Structure formats: C-alpha cells, structure tokens
Image (cartoon, rainbow, N blue to C red):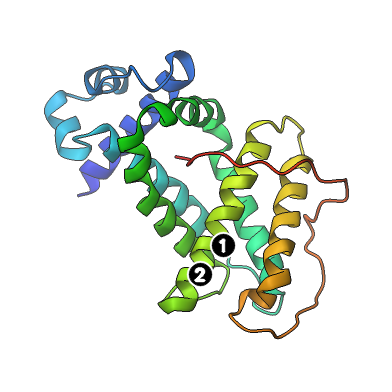
Amino acid sequence: MAQNTNVAEQLVAAAMDLAAKKGWRSLSLAEIAEAAGVPLVDAYSACPTRMAILKEAFAETDRKVLDGPRPDREEPARDRLFEVMMRRFDAMAPRKQGVAAILRDLPGDPGVLMCSLPHLAKSMAWMLEAAGLSASGPAGTLRIKALSAVYLATLRDWLNDDSPDLARTMAGLDRRLRRVESVMPGWRISMAGLCGARPSRRPTDESPPESVVPIET
C-alpha cells in the first residue's frame, strides 16, 4: 500500500507538470507514467485511470491540510473555516499552473467532471471536520454543499491572485463565508446568532466580483 501511495504521488506530480505545459485533455496515462519514471504496470496498480490521478490529487491536498494544527475551537466557526480553507489554497500553491490547466480542460470532459463531484464533497467534508464542524447527517450534507459552493467560487479568485499575501483570495473567501453565515449562523442549521473575533489572516481590502468555476483537483 505504501509503495502504491508513493507511485501515485509521483504520477500526480508528473500529471500536474505536464498539464501546466500542454494541457490536460490530450494527456495519456503512458505519457504521465513516462514523465514520472514509473513502469506502466506500477502506474496501472496505483492509478489505472486519469480520474484516479485526479482523485489522488484531491487526497494529497486533503492530507496536507489535515496534517496541520486544528483551529482553536473557541473561535467562531466562520474563522475556523477561513483558516482551514486558506491552508488548502496554500497547499495547492506549488501546482497552481497545473490546477489552472486542468480546470480549463475539464468542461470538455464531462465524464471526468461529473466523476470529480463526489471527491469534492469528500474533501469539503474533511475540511469541515478539520474546522470542528460535523459533516454527518442532513445538517452535515447542507454544510458540505455550502462549503463546496464557497470553495468553487473562491477558486477562481485564487487562480487569478498573484499577490504574495493572497489578498484577493482572502477577501473573496471571507465575503462568501459571511454570506453563508447570514443564513446559517455559526454554520449551524438554526437561527442562532454568532459573533466573534476576526482571524489573523482576515483580509482588509475590498473584495472582487463574485465568480464561479468548475471543480478543482
């Protein structure tokens, strides 16, 4: 299992590099395996499809976020989610060009796009758990849907954000989390109010226009 995980990580790294250079749509599994220096038989065992490579990319990002410290449970839910989601964007930063290339090509591959949706939901469920919010039951399902919408809308801000402090990304994320909280206070399925301190990474500039993009890897 450990060997397969290592091979999968090599394949993800190669796929991201190649996608950044030539796009995702025309990439073959053989090209990815060759670039990764992985024999085809090992590539087949670890990631037999391109969708499996994207699934592993989701999982890698999840692991990097979950490996970090958990936010202070005394902070408001919105602030905890802000910290967790910004950690996710930080984890994706080294492969930003590859992510952008894959997103550009995904609309032309509806099968892969649809198959990616469950992996997005799984990732967002774990982001909620990392922030101390349950992703279980009907309430958890609503939280997953809300956070997925916030994430996808903020993803384009991140892709177009070249600032060192990711001010545009933080502003968009903050605005959208507040919007959800206006109808789901404390990210609870109730009408209870919530107020609290702002996190250390809270943006101070004006937020950009709303935007929505397809799924991330």
Q: Up-down: is 28 above or below 73?
A: above
Circle 1 packing at 10 Å, graded few (<14), some (14-19), many (20+), is: some
Q: Quadrant of residue 14?
A: top left
Verify CB contact (< 8 Å) between mark 2 and mark 1: yes
Q: Residue furthest left?
A: 41
Using the image as rendered, state which of residue 61 and residue 149 is in the foreground. 149
Residue at the image position 64 percent from the left and 45 percent from the top: 154
Q: Position of residue 155 (x, y in %)?
A: 60, 42
Q: Which of 169 and 86 lies nearest the eye of the viewer?
A: 169
Closer to the camera in the image, 90 or 159: 159
Give the residue at mark 2. Answer: 142
Q: Residue at x 49, y 51 (%)?
A: 64
Give the answer, above or below, for where 110 lies relative to 134. above
What residue is rendered at 45% in x and 53% in y? 62
Q: Give residue 60's mark.
A: none
- Crowd around label 2: few <14 · some 14–19 · many ≥20 (10 Å): some
In the current view of this chain or complex, which residue is farthest to the right?
A: 205
Observer able to see residue 67: no
Q: Position of residue 78 (x, y in %)?
A: 69, 67
Q: Check disc 1 and report the residue beneath it.
A: 146
Quarter location, residue 122:
bottom left
